[in-house]
Amino acid sequence: MIVLEKRQQPSPWMGYLSPLLSIALTFVVAAIVVSAMGKDPLRVLSLFTLEPLNGKRAIGEVMLKATPLILCSLGLAFCFRSNVWNIGAEGQFLLGAIGAGGMAMWLTETGLTEPGWLWVTQALLLGAFAGAAWAAITAWLRDRAHANEILVSLMLVYIANLLLSYLVFGPWKDPKGWNFPQTLRFADSLSIARLGAGMRVHWGFVVALISAGVMVWLMYFTTLGARLRVGGLAPGAARFAGFSSRESLWTVLLCSGAFAGLAGAMEVLGPMGQLTPHVSTGYGFSAIIVAFVARLHPLACVLASFLLSIMMIGGELAQSRVGLPASVSSMFQGVLLMMLLTFDSLIQYRIKWRAQTSKDLAKHA
Amino acid sequence: MANGLRLSLKAISKSYGSLRANDKIDLDVKPGSIHAVLGENGAGKSTLMKLIFGLLKPDEGSIFLDGKEVRWQSPEHARTAGIAMVFQHFALFESLSVAENVWLGMDKSWSLAAVAEALHQLTRHYGLSVDPDAFVHRLSVGERQRVEIARGLLARPRVMILDEPTSVLSPQAAQALFTMIRTLASEGCSVIYISHKLHEIRELCDDCTVLRHGKVTGRVDPRQCNDEQLSALMIGSAPPPLVRATRAVSNPIVTLNALSVRAFDEASECLNAVSLELAPGEVLGIAGVSGNGQGLLLDLLSGELNSDEASMRRIDGHIFFEDRAIEHLGVRMRRRLGIMAVPAERLGRATVPELSLADNMFLSESKHMWRLDHESLYQSAQNVVDAFAVKASSPKALASDLSGGNLQKFIMGRALALQPKVLLVSQPTWGVDVGASAQIRQQLLALRDTGAAVLVISEELDELFEIADRIHVMYAGHLSAPVKRADATVELIGQWMGGSWLSSEDVSKGKPVTVPFEG
């Protein structure tokens, strides 16, 4: 029987090294898989590492894709720190997109498009609100009915997806859109200003960076952050100290819902300019990986978002340039998460082999 | 049997990293002897027993069983060679019967029926009273212990190790256990009895090896020693006697009047019409075997359980603080009134193990500004460390890095720094060494002498007799009437710990009752 034995003294520097080792090993696995598919692994490797950073435009794309990942992962890291397992950022992201997109559509139809910055701000806030409201369903069911937040938040992703499809296939479909499932294109003034010419990345990226700073402050320099951290580390101690578990549940879920919703709103008001069934390319799920690669630290979330963003773009490049299937890139993300979790376990535990005894059976009682 | 010894350890050493848990320990156990291994927590008793039982391998030294050197590969190996061990924490399947539990641990040649029959015989022979067909989840802690003992006995051991067996027993149940141990020893089985309760060792054992800081500090005949001599060997010096002043008792500050707590699921503890009065300037003791509702009583008084956040429970009745009903107030509101609790679980409840002492100071604050003031937390942790002689490298040390006694000193100090009007303490010296215990008890008395009300929940009768002014006993969710310490005897309290003051009707009421869920 293989047993995991707790290490007396987990190595502290391995904690920092393990994300790097995981990335390296992911590349090794990727190279093997790519070779087995008959492609040149070095070429694919360069597509995944060098090509996405080649030139101003390319870097702008990396920043653009990193923006929703940063926002979603900040909220998720906040939740996970407090032992609230919200894995439905994807759904909250979609609701944010629906909220902001719906408002932009209505504004475009009614011609209320100036001043653009004011309406954009309001649409973004509405998106954040919609995301928070979607997360509130999870919080409410967990609070009132002791429902498992993992299941509830995940199921709500599918509902959000169907809701979006219903809207763009049905009532919100652009009448002049050749029957494509999409809304009309929003007025030009209703898009978030870009950071520079020749780049698609917009001011939302700056907002995401500021958010990371705010989260650092909230988690480590406020009493609210301290209360939530205690609740995540030792629920018994939080009860002893009189910190309400309901308060933390609602705080982290609303906060992370708002971040994901804001990310969704930025996506439709930024690069998309309209609502389609494909607003998200799985940002909400990838953000789970980001949060863990970052060890739930807000600043590390920014770096890890860049990493994932590069992987996503690399995957697209590999698809178009050497014909790798799109699923390979999500597989690499999965491998990365697996590597990371394995390393984490091995930092805390060592593997031992020993013969099974009846004592072991009794021990599990 | 070359030298006539059943078990002999020669210069056994075992280190964990830089900590030398056992340092050249010699232990000689004669056949049929009841041999005490005495020492404070952390003296190395548990490590030594694990070495004897094959759970650990010694770094140096050798073990001889009946004169032959043995090297255990596993506990299984030690067990087949005739060594049995009863741990403090039991390893039983709740949902299986006694016989099934025992059968699972036996080698495969036994049938279930044979095991049940063997259990019946043991029952008759040793007066163990274990019903092989009973389900474990129905059994009390004492009964569970008997199952573990029976499991060990079935292997016909030549050495039986008992690790602090009376910590979960009432005095009467402990006497029954002693009878069993004496019978076992009279049949030639050697018993190694681990404890830090001196009077038990003097009553039961005929030989005693004392450990301190991983070394043997003495081998004595406990029947020839008094408590002072034994504790001098154990801690290096006898603890100073407690000083207590007498005080006039005033009106109660906290009153419970027939307060009941019902759980919505069957497994949880209940409280049945519990009444008590806690007055300023007194130490009120709550005796009883753990798990009879003490935890609930503490939560109820501290505010962790209140009628606003009852978590699947219903609370009937009132808690009065002075003249104000407070049963709906949460922990922080009650702290502002001056009620502070020190729960028994030091890690994970009274402190967060992964956080520093400074960060753990945060847990006892009742008012929060928006900004987390790291500096003032650090300073107040430093003050507690200094004022209460906590051995910690700095306030930045992690709570999990402190020894049990030092952590408890820190937790007590943190509570006392709030200058509470009412201090609620559960198991104040559980697992704490003798020196720190004496300090903590003296602090409780000092707090009482300043006019605060102190409630102490403890399993250790000695402790309650030492510091309490009045004693209640808890059993099956019922609280007995109080008895003044001067009028209390170990026999009386011991009987009450078995619920003898209750009619059978009351006791059945004490069993969990399912009530309809009312949201």
Image: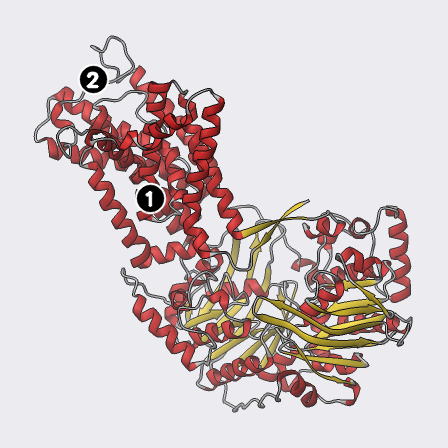
For this rendering, which residue is in front, B477 or B12? B12
Q: Chain of mark 1?
A: A
Q: Are marks 1 and 2 on the same chain?
A: yes
Return the mark for residue A184.
2
Q: Chain of mark 2?
A: A
Q: Quadrant of residue B220?
A: bottom right
Relative to B436, is A291 above or below?
above
**Residue A160 in view, yes or no:** yes
x, y percentage for residue A118?
Answer: 12, 35
The colour scheme of the drawn protein is secondary structure
Marks 1 and 2 in Cβ contact (< 8 Å): no
For this rendering, which residue is in front, B12 or A199? B12
Of tags 1 and 2, the one toward the viewer is: 1
Badge 2: few (under 14), some or many (20 or more) residues near its Cα, within 10 Å? many
Q: Residue at x 34, y 41 (%)?
A: A304
Task: Tell me which amino acid carries mark 1.
Answer: Cys
User: Disc 2 on helix, strand or loop?
Assistant: loop
Relative to B42, is A328 above or below?
above
Q: Is residue A222 left or right of residue A25?
A: left
Q: Quadrant of residue B185?
A: bottom right
Task: Tell me which amino acid carries mark 2.
Answer: Leu
List the residue tagged with mark 1: A301
Looking at the image, which residue sits at the far top?
A178
